Amino acid sequence: MVRLRRESKPVLLENKSKWSSGAKKVWLGGNYPVVVQSMTTTDTADADKTLEQIYGLAAAGCEVVRVTVKDAPDAAGMPAIVSRSPVPIVADIHFDHKMALAALEAGVAKLRLNPGNITDRTKTREVVQLAKDMGTPIRIGVNMGSLAHDLEKQYGHTPEAMVRSALRHVEILEELGHTDIVISLKAHDVPTTVYAYRLADQMLAERRTPYALHLGITEAGLPREGTIKSSIGLGILLWEGIGDTLRCSLAADPIEEVPVCWGILKALQIREKGFDITACPSCGRAEIEVVDLARSVEAIAKEYEAPVKVAVMGCVVNGPGESKMADVGVAGGKGKGAIYRKGTLVGTFPEAELLGALRIEIEKVIADVYPDFIGETAHGKALATSAS
Ligand code: SF4
């Protein structure tokens, strides 16, 4: 299956503190993988607490983390955050150009800044020039609540008003010679978000400036509703090849956002990370607690990075057939369970031994099918491997 991806201009996200040489670098856009992002909820001024959350996000699979820099105490926390972060840090700036300068000097990998919001053009020029000199990309982020007033009057709360507002900020950066640009157009509902990004894709292509797009639905809601909205809205766009990075904004601990982003990418087969677990819905034929078994498999999955496909079936009626598509299948029987490898029976095991046997089979699959992931756990290489 061929999925075409929108052309976009790649930008490099790299922490530039002299102490941050160990941090990952991330390319965003072009043919690089779609990047998973989130944002801290801690007080940026408390660098240790913020770093604790950044490490938690990174361990969950978050590849870029944004932190707000709203005042001088926040700015004072930035050098420590940037120098010790394991992933690129983006500074979220609103109106105060001094915060932008401080974040740049701390070595952030990217600024999120709408240059038109800094009313004094001399100050805008100062920020953009420093960003340009340091090779720091800028994301322009327009939400339905931050439209240019005249465009809001002319176009109302529409995708067109969002895109035209974003392009105004783009023009300011372009005039100042800074074209390492990323754009986001977040609305709080799915249809507006989808239309806004599609329109942006079209208008950017027409003006031959295919800047990278950061996808998101703003204030998507509590985890259940936010996951649904993000999956549908961002899923439609990603399937159409639109989008270079995504954030699933949830009213929850930001660490909860990361598996949602990965779930969307995995479901669309855009990126692989960790297990792909399918489970039957269970029915009157079930001879094992399918949900409990699937949750146990999910717990095992958290320990691995390899993209092992596991099918969990409640009975042996469909178990062998369904598990043909999976690397490993497990099906319930009366007081026991059967394990399959690509649909071929490996053996039957008493229920008490089933998970242990499944883990052994999973390890064999990783060795045979995903050798690059041998010793790779969700928290990095296993000690035995990293010591060698
Ligand atoms: S696999 Fe068995 S238990 Fe699960 S839904 Fe199908 S028939 Fe029912």
Image (cartoon, rainbow, N blue to C red):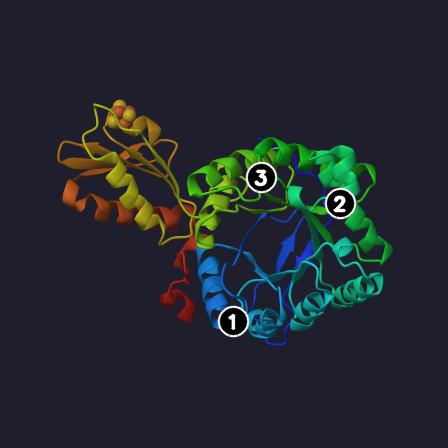
Q: Which residue is mark 1?
A: 47
Q: Quadrant of the C terminus?
A: bottom left
Whole-angstrom CA distance, mark 1 to mark 2, is: 34 Å
In the image, taking residue 220 as reference, residue 304 lies left or right, namely left
Q: Residues within 10 Å of mark 3 (few under 14, many from 20)?
A: some
Quadrant of image for the N terminus:
top right
Q: Nearer the viewer, residue 211 or 200?
A: 200
Which residue is most to the bottom?
Answer: 18
Would residue 386 appear left or right of 360 to someone viewing this image?
right
Work out whether mark 1 precedes mark 2 in sequence or the reverse, and give the earlier one.
1
| Residue under the image location 45 percent in, 47 percent down | 259
Q: Earlier in the sequence, mark 1 or mark 3?
A: 1
| Label 3 SS | loop
Q: CA distance from mark 1 to mark 3?
A: 30 Å
In terms of image quarters, where does ligand 1 lie? top left
Labelled pair 1, 3 in contact (Cβ < 8 Å): no
- Relative vertical location of residue 305 with respect to residue 334 in this rendering, above or below: below
What residue does disc 2 label? 148
Residue 196 place in picture, x, y as percent:
68, 36
Q: Is mark 2 within 8 Å of ligand 1?
A: no
Instruction: Please state which amino acid type lies under the numbered disc 3.
Output: His
Given contact means CB atoms under 8 Å apart, are the residues at marks 1 and 2 in contact? no
Q: Which mark is residue 188?
A: 3
User: What is the C-alpha distance between the residues marked 2 and 3?
Assistant: 18 Å
Identify the element where label 2 is drawn. Answer: loop
Mark 1 vs mark 2: in front: 2
Regarding residue 29, the answer to whether it shows in the image is yes
Tell me, yes or no, if residue 185 can be seen here. no
What amino acid type should be assigned to the residue bearing mark 1? Answer: Ala
Q: Which of the marked residues, 2 or 3, is nearer the chain's N terminus?
A: 2
In the displayed structure, would residue 169 be above or below residue 207? below
Query: Which quadrant of the figure has residue 343?
Result: top left
